[in-house]
Image (tube, rainbow, N blue to C red):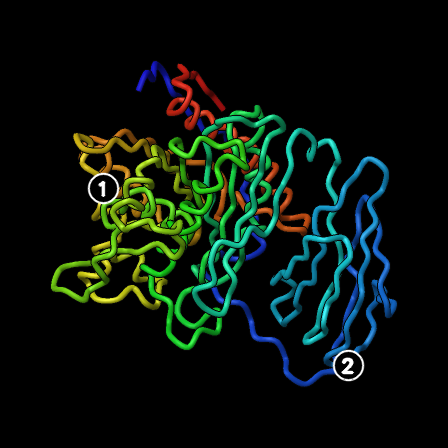
């Protein structure tokens, strides 16, 4: 790589407050009712509800369906509608709606509202939402495509969301996607996958290899439809945050494990078959297609078996875990070069610095190009985008500048830029 100078100096910023943990489970909702439903603070627009909801709150029976219409002020556009649960710990578990007219079924104490964004921030690109790529279980798997106007044969960036492998979906990464398409150099995709264990209501638990198979399936679907997106299917990068950081690293490192040899059916054979494959494609052909992944930017993720085992409930045996753990599957640079850009907030309360540092050192010792950026004052999940003011503020302070830094790294891979980038 023609990389003359790539400097990332972290600014001294105040600590970030993250409104929800990426590696936890959602609280359970009360089963009986009636429930208190309030209207959230609405900025830069308004919402109409039937029945009428007030800021002070109204009492509604379980099962009541509230119709909501979000109306932006002049110069603003609809970002998302939401309902957020309330517990003794406060408000914090969001369900988002991506159309301005939506319906909320009342099954708990909720606050209902909508988020609006400056229309200028949505100019210059289009979004194709909810592209379905597979349905291996209860949940339909989909992704969103963010396409710059006039896109033609551009490299692509695939984002994998976090949430403890068991919460959130692709919508939470839309802020990062909107930053990464600035400059019209990339088509960006935000993908969803199955939740671990029984999180989706599946009769059989979802193991780590199932989630990785989903991510590979999404990428193969994206490649198959590259012409529709203005994408060069042979030039791809992956990124993701928290649990998505782990998955992004695994997707980038484990390509040689893609195949149709089965998972543990033969001694020592652990191969991942993508959840979706184009008609007639073999496992070997899928592996070859996925070699289009040239770079990875895992954000505040976990990479070793011991660290992943702290949170993932179905990693499997030690052999199974090692078969896919990013730290145990770093590609040989003589066979496949893979540039990796790691990032973590200095006050991250979930991901220890040592976990990322060890992975960075393993990459360097293996001869792969790698960088580790430490963001002074940032906590966990600063690449998230949610409707609440705290998450938006955190994203503006940390997510926006470090999305630019990530994009600059990708530029060195796909555009061979000589970059002197100082924050």
**Upstream in sequence: badge 2 or badge 1:** 2
For label 1, the residue is 330
The residue at the point 61 percent across, 76 percent down is 29
Q: Which mark is residue 61?
A: 2
**Image-based side of 214 in relation to 315, left or right:** right
- Compared to 204, does 187 lie above or below? above
Q: Is residue 96 left or right of residue 24?
A: right
295 with respect to 82 (left or right): left
Where the N terminus falls, by quadrant?
A: top left
The picture quadrant where one finds residue 104 is bottom right
Nearer to us in this view, 344 or 181: 181
Q: Indicate the secondary structure of the residue bearing disc 1.
A: loop
- Residue 209 or residue 232, whichever sits in front: 232
**Residue 370 in view:** yes
Q: Residues within 10 Å of mark 2 (few under 14, many from 20)?
A: some
Q: Residue at x 77, y 77 (%)?
A: 64
In this rendering, the answer to whether 345 lies above or below 273 is above
Task: Report the residue at 78% width, 66% height from top.
Answer: 38
Q: Give the distance between the C-alpha atoms of the residues marked 2 and 1, in whole angstroms.
A: 54 Å
């Amino acid at each position: 790589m023609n990389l003359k100078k790539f400097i990332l100096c972290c600014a001294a910023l105040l600590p970030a407050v993250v409104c929800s943990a990426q590696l936890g489970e959602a609280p359970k909702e009360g089963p009986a009712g009636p429930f208190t439903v309030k209207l959230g603070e609405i900025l830069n627009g308004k919402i109409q509800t039937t029945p009428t909801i007030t800021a002070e709150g109204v009492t509604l029976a379980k099962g009541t369906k509230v119709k909501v219409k979000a109306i932006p002020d002049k110069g603003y556009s609809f970002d998302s509608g939401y309902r957020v649960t309330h517990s003794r710990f406060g408000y914090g578990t969001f369900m988002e709606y991506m159309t301005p007219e939506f319906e909320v079924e009342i099954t708990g104490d909720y606050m209902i509202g909508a988020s609006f964004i400056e229309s200028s921030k949505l100019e210059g690109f289009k979004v194709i939402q909810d592209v379905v790529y597979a349905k291996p279980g209860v949940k339909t798997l989909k992704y969103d495509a963010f396409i710059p106007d006039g896109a033609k044969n551009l490299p692509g960036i695939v984002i994998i969301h976090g949430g403890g492998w068991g919460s959130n979906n692709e919508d939470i990464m839309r802020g990062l996607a909107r930053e990464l398409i600035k400059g019209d150099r990339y088509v960006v995709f935000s993908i969803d996958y199955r939740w671990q264990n029984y999180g989706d209501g599946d009769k059989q638990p979802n193991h780590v290899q199932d989630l990785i198979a989903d991510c590979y399936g999404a990428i193969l679907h994206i490649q198959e439809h590259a012409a529709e997106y203005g994408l060069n299917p042979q030039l791809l990068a992956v990124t993701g945050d928290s649990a998505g950081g782990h998955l992004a690293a695994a997707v980038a490192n484990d390509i040689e494990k893609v195949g149709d040899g089965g998972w543990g059916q033969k001694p020592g054979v652990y191969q991942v078959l993508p959840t979706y494959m184009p008609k007639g494609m073999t496992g070997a052909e899928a592996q070859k297609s996925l070699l289009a992944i040239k770079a990875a930017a895992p954000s505040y993720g976990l990479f070793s078996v011991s660290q992943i085992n702290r949170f993932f409930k179905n990693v499997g045996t030690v052999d199974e875990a090692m078969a896919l753990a990013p730290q145990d599957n770093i590609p040989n640079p003589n066979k496949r070069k893979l540039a990796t850009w790691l990032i973590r907030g200095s006050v991250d309360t979930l991901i220890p610095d040592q976990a990322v540092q060890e992975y960075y050192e393993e990459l360097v010792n293996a001869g792969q190009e790698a960088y580790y950026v430490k963001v002074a004052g940032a906590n966990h999940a600063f690449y998230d985008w949610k409707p609440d003011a705290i998450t938006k503020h955190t994203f503006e302070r940390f997510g926006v500048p470090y999305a630019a830094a990530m994009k600059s790294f990708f530029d060195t891979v796909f555009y061979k830029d000589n970059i002197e980038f100082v924050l």
